[in-house]
Every structure is written in C-alpha cells, then in structure tokens.
Image (cartoon, helix red, strand yellow):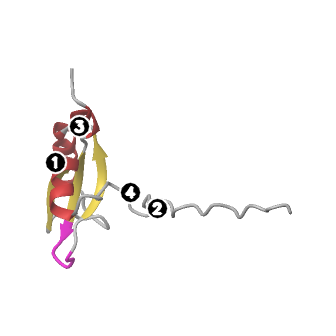
C-alpha cells in the first residue's frame, strides 16, 4: 500500500529555452515514465513551440519543493495559484443593554 506522500507525488515536464532564465512547467503526469514520454514527443515539435534549443526535464513534486520552496505546487500556465485564505475576521457582536 502506498503512503500518502507517495500518492501525492506527480511529475511535471519543465522547459527552459536558451533565451529564458526560468523553467516553465508545461504538463503534469502521474508517473515519471509518462513525463519522459512527453519529453520525447516535445523534442520533435517544430514551429512556434520549437523545443530543439531548449532544456527539457522532469521534475517530481518532491524535487520541485526542494528546489523552489516548500509551498511549491504545479500550476498550469495561465492558471491561478492557490493561496491560503486571509484569516477571517469575526463579525462584531451587538450587545444589548
């Protein structure tokens, strides 16, 4: 039986083009093998999304947290990052006299 940590792990395909300073996560997969297969498909892309001169790598959730910080999670490009909600303020209570 897998532990909760193992169940929560996932693998992302990351790309860093030669003119960029940051890694972009372009897809999320359940297994490292699926992510590696996606990288092989991407190497054949030409045109607007040309990955010929780019670094491609697989990053697991655990590796991402070590490299980018404990709060790191995969967010699709253009997606909204989840943030912790602000602490809710208690409504003022009326006191009857």
Residue under label 4, please give it.
76
Which quadrant holds residue 30? top left
**Cα gap from disc 4 to disc 3, whole angstroms:** 22 Å
Q: In this view, does 5 lie above or below 24?
A: above
Q: Determine the residue positioned at 23% across, 49% down.
A: 61
Residues drawn in magenta? 16-21
Q: Which residue lies furthest to the front in this view?
A: 97
Considering the numbered disc 2 on the image, is that residue within a helix, a strand or a loop?
loop
- The quarter of the image holding the C terminus is bottom right
**Cα gap from disc 1 to disc 3, whole angstroms:** 28 Å
In the image: residue 59, left or right of residue 77: left
Dot 1 or dot 2, earlier in sequence: 1
Residue under label 3, please give it.
5
Q: Single out the mark in the foreground, 1 or 4.
A: 4
Dot 1 or dot 3, earlier in sequence: 3
**Cα gap from disc 4 to disc 2, whole angstroms:** 8 Å
**Cα gap from disc 3 to disc 2, whole angstroms:** 24 Å
Q: In this view, does 41 lie above or below 75?
A: above
Residue 10 among magenta residues = no
Measuring from the top left, give residue 80's x and y in whole percent: 46, 61
Q: Residue 40 carries which label?
A: 1
Measuring from the top left, give residue 53's x and y in whole percent: 14, 69
Measuring from the top left, give residue 71's x and y in whole percent: 30, 59
Residue under label 2, please give it.
80
Residue sitting nearer the eye, 84 or 68: 84
Q: Determine the residue positioned at 21% across, 44% down.
A: 35
Considering the numbered disc 4 on the image, is that residue within a helix, a strand or a loop?
loop
């Amino acid at each position: 039986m897998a532990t909760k940590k193992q169940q929560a792990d996932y693998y992302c395909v990351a790309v860093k083009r030669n003119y960029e300073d940051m890694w972009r996560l372009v897809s999320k997969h359940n297994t490292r093998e699926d992510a590696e297969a996606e990288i092989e498909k991407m190497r054949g892309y030409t045109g607007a999304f040309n990955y010929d001169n780019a670094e491609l790598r697989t990053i697991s959730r655990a590796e991402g947290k070590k490299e980018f910080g404990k709060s790191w999670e995969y967010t699709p490009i253009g997606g909204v990052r989840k943030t912790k909600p602000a602490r809710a303020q208690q409504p003022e209570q009326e006191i009857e006299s």
